[in-house]
Each structure stands twice: as structure tokens, then as C-alpha cells.
Image (cartoon, helix red, strand yellow):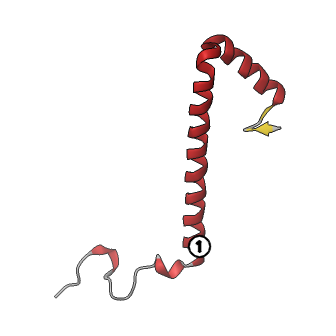
Amino acid sequence: MNVFGVGLPEMAVIGAVALLVFGPKRLPEFGRTLGKTLKGFQSASKEFEREISKAMADPESMAPSDDEPSGGHPPDA
């Protein structure tokens, strides 16, 4: 098991220190908060990956069309 470059022995030490620092009553609360945070990061990462894949698959939708002036300035009259 290797999460973010941290193996099982390191995770056990981190868990033991967290238990000593926060105590057994608050540790589950921190675990839930950490889990929700990681799940949020994971879903944001997947959404970002989908958007990048979508943009790479359809590059013409990102390019300015011939109707739009280049540079964002209105055409000279």
C-alpha cells in the first residue's frame, strides 16, 4: 500500500501520532473530514481530466470562428 509516496509503516506512525495528539474521541471526526476532502479533490480532478479530454478531442470548438474578429477588438468601419 503506497498513498502519496507514504507506505504502511509510515501511515501507522502518522495514525499513532494523530491518536496521541487529537485523542480517540476527535480522531473519527478528523478521519471523516479528511475522507470528504480527498473525495472532493478526486471528483474535481476527474472533472478537470474530462474537460481537458473534451477540449483535446474537439479543438475546433476552442478556436475563434471567422465571424469573430481576432484579438477581441471590433472591426474597423
Camera-side residue: 5 or 65?
5
Q: How many marks?
A: 1
| Residue of label 1 | 56
Residue, x 62% and y 37% (percent of image)?
A: 35
Q: Position of residue 73 (x, y in %)?
A: 25, 76
Residue 25's place in the image compared with 10, above or below, is above
Residue 29 in which image quadrant: top right
Q: Which residue is depicted at the point 76% across and 36% down? A: 5
Q: Is residue 63 left or right of residue 4?
A: left
The N terminus - image quarter: top right
To which quarter of the image does residue 69 belong? Answer: bottom left
Q: Residue at x 39, y 85 (%)?
A: 65
The answer to whether 32 appears left or right of 70 in the picture is: right
The location of residue 16, given as percent across then percent down, is 73, 16
Q: Amino acid at mark 1?
A: Met
| Up/down of 54 relative to 48, above or below | below
Q: Is residue 66 above or below residue 29?
A: below
Q: Pick the residue in front: 74 or 7.
A: 7
